Amino acid sequence: MNTSTLESCPNIIEERQAIAAPGRAIEGVLSYPVDSEPKYSVLVVGPHPLMGGNLDNNVVRALAGGLAANGAVTLAFNYSGVGQSEGGPDDWQAAASQFWATGKVDQERAWIDDANAARKALAKLNIAPMIVVGYSFGCWVTAELPADPDTTRWVLVSPNPNRHRFDGLSKCSIPLLVVHSDNDFASTTEQTRAWFDCLRNPKSLNMLDSAEHFFRGREQALLDTVVQFLESEQTP
Amino acid sequence: MTDILLTGATGSLGHYLLAELLSRTQARVRVLASESEASAAIRLGDLLDELGINLRSFIDSGRVRFVRGRLPDALDPSGLAGIDTVLHAAANTAFVATGEGEPEHTNVRGTAALLAAAAHHGVRHFVQISTAFVCGDETGLIAEEFSESSPPFCNDYERSKWQAEQLVRGWANDQRQATICRPSILFGDAATGRTTSADGVYLIARATDALARAVRTSSAADQHTVPLRILGSPSATCNLVPVDFTARRIVSIITDPAMHGCVHHITNSDPPTHADIKRWLEEYFDIGGGTFSNEHWPLSNPNHYEELFYALGNVVQDYFRDGLVFASRADGNGQPKRRLIDRDDFLRSLRYAHSRKWGRKRPAASCDGVDPEWYFEHHLADTIAQSRVARVHNLTTVVTYTIDAAPDEWTCTFDKGRLTQVVRGQRPESVEFGFTITRNAFNRLVTGEWSPQQVFLDGHADISGDVERALRMVPIIAEYIDEYPVPLVEAPQ
Ligand SMILES: NC(=O)c1ccc[n+]([C@@H]2O[C@H](COP(=O)([O-])OP(=O)(O)OC[C@H]3O[C@@H](n4cnc5c(N)ncnc54)[C@H](OP(=O)(O)O)[C@@H]3O)[C@@H](O)[C@H]2O)c1
């Protein structure tokens, strides 16, 4: 296995993209190796935009950059209303009040459309196989995406089964990796394991110790886990 | 020559008292200071400079000395050796009891400690700066005498000052005298409008300022017809007394033995009414539309403007009383009433305080970064009511912010989008979550250089308590900082 380290994540090119989402353009970053043809494509779907979900998020950067250094073409994006992405809640006050009360906002369906638009944009590059990686809220977003026959692997980093339903996971039977940290505030190890046990096969669960929900300073360990999963599985 | 121990010298009234003692008497003054002599001399020197008094020369000539201490626990009784008169102006002026036990701690226990030390050292005269509002909720003519039984109080501050008076009264005997001076509500210097406090009645001006700015930036309301209910009656009065006048009266009392051993009201026999003050504020801020209402606090279904106006709390009712008259032998019986504060005096002081941004301190220079005390206790408190955060009506929580290198901690209480309390120090049990942030990241965060998300994800901040709720607060913090970043160098003083 040839895992790039984050510190030396150098030999990649990052290109800003304008992705056409319904009624708006959203901002994306396409990353790929400088000196080799990409072997696979990865869509990275970040955490909740109101909880630090943007292109600068440490996990998004680690996965998008690290997997590109490892031979993938990756696409990460800003949800609408974040960074240079158009759209977003019309009424900040209402959205902030709703989010404070419930941890959710009405806008969330539009963010699924953003992810779908990004996936379509990535698919146009025709670099198979396609892998979808969600982190935190992004796990739920990936599960809500329409079924896609070209997607061959699925990675969920810190999903929160206490907050979200993941019915979409049963729509296909591609290999699934769940990465969980043993001190995640959002879901205890027991909760995640109980939820994971009910998921369809094939699947694997990887526990990281003391990485919290946020993987601050543990980005490399996370990247290694994901790379290992992608390399150990054969493309169907 | 008399030796006087002065407490509370750095306060709004205290430094005027010191100025009067130095310029009108020959007394040697020992100043109780809670900081080192050097820093007390700088702080007090700056205040006296503004009154045209060179403190350094009085220190050099031996007329002013500092005694280090804090009431009640950190008082070295030997600091009172050789003192003839104690002029006790230190107090905690929090109206509502805090988690640290104030105002009772300073005002009652502190006074008790000072009285004990004074008794030990044979002090002959104790002058207690009390408040005319030890009368609590009573109305009618309030006599210049000790009240035998405790009246119903409007707040914890009044109760603590009443209790302190009782202690002082009990201290007096045939060897020693206790004099009580009861000012009403301190207002700016009669000549210049100068005030070092932007609290008290200035809170009403600050609330009106916030309202006026909001109305001018919104197209939804006309600034002369703002729908605002003002709690209270137009004829209620606000018993304001100029701070310099008050200090002069107190020093006259000290220097006249015939006045010792009595209670003195230092009050305004012809105070402005609520209607006067409303009119003056409307004129100053070019705003109108408010109507008096006999509803009770809290207001039912407040509109957006009322929320802004009352964001600092029930600012109005604390300062206006109906049917209250303070007897005062100084005003003389049957003499014509003397207006201590008219429109011009009021507006002069308003201009003074407003031009100094309601006492908002200048943030420390950029090399030191932003002073967290200034940030939490002034900047946040002054601006959040006008920010979009105030419209997050369900924002009710208690949050602690710890600046790790300080190590300082502020607990902010939000109630329905309003910041109702900022307390420094000890965490109350009601804290829902807390943020701990490095000093450097704090500077970068509040100036808008780094986002809250970045600060946290890059490991410069940590969360304690309910992480989920803390994360839900993050976009609200981000929005506020986006609206009110701290400029690295603030407007001139
Ligand atoms: N403001 C009014 O409208 C008003 C009206 C009537 C009566 N009064 C009375 O007038 C007096 C002065 O009030 P003010 O408005 O000038 O108050 P202020 O500006 O808040 O000043 C309070 C002073 O007391 C000192 N102090 C506070 N807690 C202390 C403690 N535990 N030990 C020692 N010193 C302490 C402060 O020193 P640090 O700065 O070092 O803490 C400061 O010098 C008080 O007795 C107050 O009750 C005030």
Image (cartoon, grey):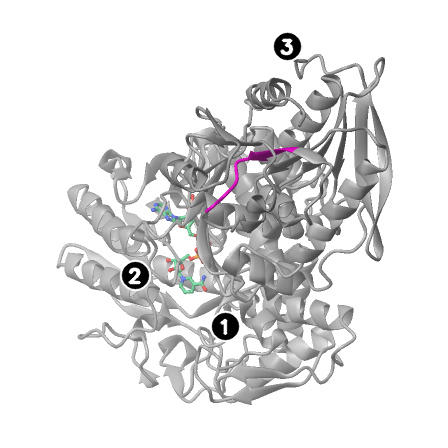
Task: Pick out the residue farthest to the top.
Answer: A2
Q: Nearer the viewer, residue B209 or A35?
A: A35
Is label 2 or label 3 in front? 3
A5 or A179, which is in the foreground?
A179
The image quarter in which residue A13 lies: top right
Q: CA distance from mark 1 to mark 3?
A: 80 Å
Chain designation of label 2 = B
Badge 1 marks a residue whose secondary structure is strand
What residue is pinned by disc 2? B257
Give the x, y percent position of residue B305.
63, 75
Q: Amino acid at mark 3?
A: Met
Q: Secondary structure at mark 3?
A: loop
Q: Residue furthest front?
A: A236
Using the image, name the chain to which the residue with label 3 belongs. A
Among the 4 quarters of the image, the one containing residue B283: bottom right
Can residue B277 be seen by looking at this rendering?
A: yes
Name the disc covering residue B240, or none: 1
Q: Is residue B332 above or below residue B357?
A: below
Lateral position of residue B300 relative to residue A70, left or right:
left
Mark in front: 1 vs 2: 1
Per the rendered image, the range of residues in magenta is: A153-161
Decide whether residue A66 is among the magenta residues.
no
Give residue A74's position: percent from left, percent from top. 76, 29
User: Which class describes the residues within 10 Å of circle 3: few (<14), some (14-19), or many (20+)?
Assistant: few
Residue drawn at x 36%, y 37% is: A190
State yes or no: residue A159 in magenta: yes
Amino acid type indicated by mark 2: Pro
Evaluate whether residue B379 shows in this view: no
Q: Does residue B37 sit above or below B390 in this rendering?
A: above
On what subunit does the disc labeled 1 rest?
B
